[in-house]
Amino acid sequence: MKLGFVLETAAALYLLLSPAQSLPLSNTNRTSGVLTFQEVWGRSFCRTIEKLVEVVQEYPAEVEHIYSPSCVPLVRCAGCCGDENLECHPTRTSNVTMQLLKIRPSEPGQEYVEMTFVEHQTCECRVKKPIVKVESKRQRGRGRKRKEKQKMKECVRSLAGNCGHASPVQCGSRFLPSIDQDSPPWTPCAQTQSAGSFRCP
């Protein structure tokens, strides 16, 4: 019984300490020295490199679940292109399937699941796509109403004098009120004999 407990404890400690043990010792011992421009340029230029990517970033719909580990190592394009108008883009991709531990907080238990992720194989610098600002329908509607009101005002100014205020002037689907009491207030200019057809398009 005690031997089994000791083995389980040792295995747990090994899993916790194994990421730290995998770090390269050569980087930790680097205390001096200057990297040359060619070396810095070669390391920072657009290329494939292993990155740690959050699982929920690749699967946003799974945000209510907990995955262990919460991030996975994926080969992705990254780096600089030497020009502000260019950005690093993948030219060839492949899929990789990984086994993760899925935990549902609302339900007891856990299960191993297989999830597929996209990895980049080759990269190149491409011209950035311009960012297009999309106006909301509400803003477009407000602008249209403003234009209609302005058009109505111009129609009223240009056609009111032509009818001599003897009858209403039809501006689209609206009418100007008539001052002449003998003429019905809903009669458009086009229906009167004293005036021609005055109508806004």
Image (spheres, rainbow, N blue to C red):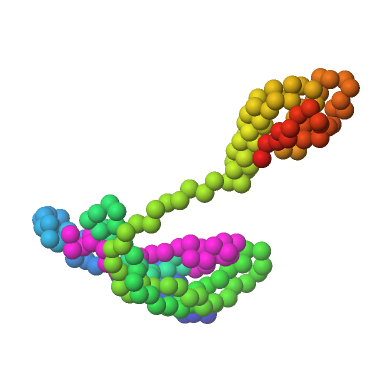
Q: Is residue 62 above or below residue 31?
A: below
Q: Is residue 167 above or below residue 96?
A: above
User: Which of the image's four quarters has the C terminus?
Assistant: top right
Residue 153 showing in the rendered view:
no
Residue 72 showing in the rendered view:
yes
Q: Looking at the image, how many numbered discs can be counted on the residues? A: 0
The image shows residue 5 at horizontal and vertical percentages of 49, 75
The image shows residue 3 at horizontal and vertical percentages of 47, 80
Q: Is residue 130 left or right of residue 188?
A: left
**Residue at the image point whose x is 59% and y is 43% from the top:** 140
Q: Quadrant of residue 88?
A: bottom left
Q: Is residue 115 left or right of residue 165?
A: left
**Residue at the image point whose x is 22% and y is 66% from the top:** 25
Q: Who is closer to the viewer here, 109 or 187?
A: 187
**Residue at the image point whose x is 32% and y is 59% from the top:** 127
Q: Who is closer to the viewer here, 44 or 90?
A: 90
**Residue at the image point whose x is 81% and y is 31% from the top:** 192
The image shows residue 92 at horizontal and vertical percentages of 35, 75
Q: Is residue 98 found inside the magenta-colored segment of the image?
A: no
Q: Quadrant of residue 60?
A: bottom right
Residue located farthest toward the front when viewing the structure as drawn: 193
Q: Is residue 114 left or right of residue 180?
A: left
Q: Who is closer to the viewer here, 77 or 139?
A: 139
Q: Is residue 58 found inside the magenta-colored segment of the image?
A: yes
Q: Is residue 123 above or below residue 163?
A: below
Q: Who is closer to the viewer here, 137 or 148?
A: 148
Q: Is residue 176 left or right of residue 103?
A: right
Q: Which residues are magenta?
A: 41-68
